[in-house]
DNA sequence: AATAAAATATGATATTTGTCATACAACTTC
DNA sequence: GAAGTTGTATGACAAATATCATATTTTATT
């Protein structure tokens, strides 16, 4: 069993407020999982009863819309926690989490977290602040969805992917999404997404090589939306 | 100065966790305001440094989009608190709050709230849960914006207004929004909103009489979206 | 009450986006 | 390596929505 106090990713989440004793207690009751690409960590409506700490990999948080499409609400990567809202609300999870690449995650049961909540004020404050960040981002995202064109949203999504998850040595986006998933982030039909990517390609602002997308002119890409 | 322990609306917010002493302390440092219809309570980017408790009236939370449109993110009514996220994040407010009707609000300074946060666990837990509800609603709202047509969103918005804020004796929606504001909730152009309202009217699912809108066939309205 | 200003309504049209069909490419599986 | 399956691409077209113009109605102001 690996030790939480030696786990580097905890430094990036609310868990950084915990002291050595508290971390040892967590290490004792946590369970570690390997999730393969494409597998779910949890599914909308499930009772999770705890939080996941992402040690490695990226996953998508999705919600199935009435029309049968999976909308990607958010991407989560190493260092972040998953399932906090549902744990605090004491409700089933509202979103599904599915691995976009092979992942390492730890599960910490709710009872443990709630205990720390009461004894360590910094920790609960950190969690609260993290949820506040999520809320602000969700509100902003909502405005983007409501007010911007599909074209704009796709351009901004590509830039977001580059800025947040970085690029490979050949400058292509590190996070690999299928066209369907990219459409699910943007909130559009897969064909529309493909068509717009082709357009961006022809405009010379991105280069497409199979699943690899490279932004070659970020400024022009963001301007190329009208 | 009115006394918070006799204020009925506190029963509907996180403040219900406070005891008599704590309420007396709040009553001492709070300030009461009357906000006239159309006036802002606060504006995007402002430092608020406290929370507002809505004693009466309804306001809209809006965000100015890059294209110059005001997107209405949420409506807030009596019994609810305003500015919690910004206070906890220690940031300027992300949204503007503007009165849709004459309002009575109380302002409680941040120092006071943060004091209660540390001494009353139920209170801080209530606030945290309220923010979790907001986050869940924002995520769901986001999916609606991304996946549903303008027509569907307008229909659902009308039903939401009826279910949440009720109707007048003549069955018309109690909350009165201009066509521009309604378009701002739906995330569409004002003309499109007006056109769709006319269509719904012709379909016989709503009746329009100036600013008064009456839903006459809720089930058909929700079905009338294709 | 007269005038101005703002909000609502509607037509005409352009643009954006979705849908359906089909082709091709890439990847699995046997 | 052949056949099936899935993902990507593109054309043709339909539908939804935005934009611009203009009329009409309502509301505010003097």
Image (cartoon, coloured by chain):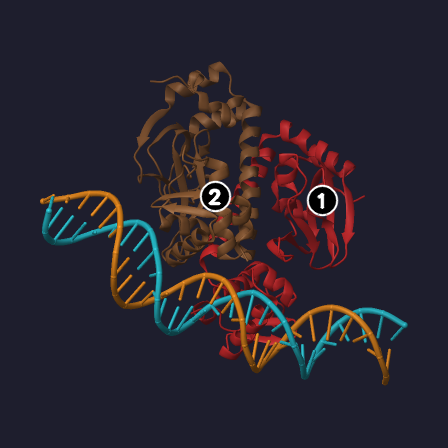
Chain colours: A brown, B red, C orange, D cyan
Which quadrant is home to the N terminus of chain A?
A: top left
Q: Quadrant of residue A104?
A: top left
Q: What element carries label 1?
A: helix
Subunit bearing disc 1: B
Asked if residue B125 is positioned above or below residue A122 in the image, the reply reads: below
Asked if residue B84 is positioned above or below residue D6 in the image, the reply reads: above
Residue B91 visible in the current orientation: yes
Viewer-proximal residue among B55 and A148: A148
Subunit bearing disc 2: A
Q: Locate residue A6, reporting x and y percent.
A: 43, 16
Judge from the rendering whether residue B134 lies leftward or rightward of residue B56; answer left or right.
left
Residue sitting at x 39%, y 47%: A208
**For the residues carrying marks 2 and 1, which lies nearer the camera in this image?**
2
The label number, if any, that marks residue B6 in the structure image: 1
Asked if residue A126 is positioned above or below residue A185 in the image, the reply reads: above
The label number, if any, that marks residue A216 in the structure image: 2
Q: Locate residue C9, reporting x and y percent.
A: 61, 78
Q: Locate residue B44, reporting x and y percent.
A: 68, 47
Dot 2 and dot 1 within a common chain: no
Question: Mark 2 packing: few (<14 Cα in 10 Å), some, or many (20+)?
Answer: some
Q: Distance between the residues labelled 2 and 1?
A: 63 Å
The label number, if any, that marks residue A49 in the structure image: none
Judge from the rendering whether residue D3 lies leftward or rightward of residue B197; answer left or right.
left
Q: Locate residue B178, reporting x and y percent.
A: 66, 66
């Amino acid at each position: 069993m690996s030790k939480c106090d030696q786990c580097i990713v905890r430094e990036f989440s609310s868990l950084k407020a915990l002291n050595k004793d508290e971390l040892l207690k967590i290490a004792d009751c946590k369970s570690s999982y390997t999730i393969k690409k494409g597998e779910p960590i949890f599914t909308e409506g499930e009772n999770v009863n705890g939080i996941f700490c992402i040690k490695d990999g990226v996953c998508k948080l999705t919600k199935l819309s009435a029309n049968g499409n999976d909308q990607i609400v958010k991407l989560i990567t190493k260092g972040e926690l998953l399932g906090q809202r549902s744990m605090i609300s004491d409700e089933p999870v509202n979103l599904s989490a599915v691995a976009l690449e092979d992942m390492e995650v730890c599960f910490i049961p709710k009872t443990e977290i709630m205990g720390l909540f009461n004894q360590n004020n910094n920790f609960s404050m950190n969690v609260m602040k993290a949820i506040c960040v999520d809320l602000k981002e969700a509100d902003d995202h909502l405005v983007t969805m409501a007010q911007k064109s599909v074209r704009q949203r796709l351009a901004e999504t590509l830039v977001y992917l580059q800025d947040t998850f970085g690029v490979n040595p050949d400058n292509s986006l590190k996070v690999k999404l299928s066209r369907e998933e990219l459409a699910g982030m943007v909130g559009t039909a897969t064909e529309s997404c493909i068509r717009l990517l082709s357009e961006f390609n022809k405009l010379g602002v991105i280069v497409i090589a199979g699943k690899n997308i490279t932004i070659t002119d970020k400024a022009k890409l963001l301007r190329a939306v009208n």
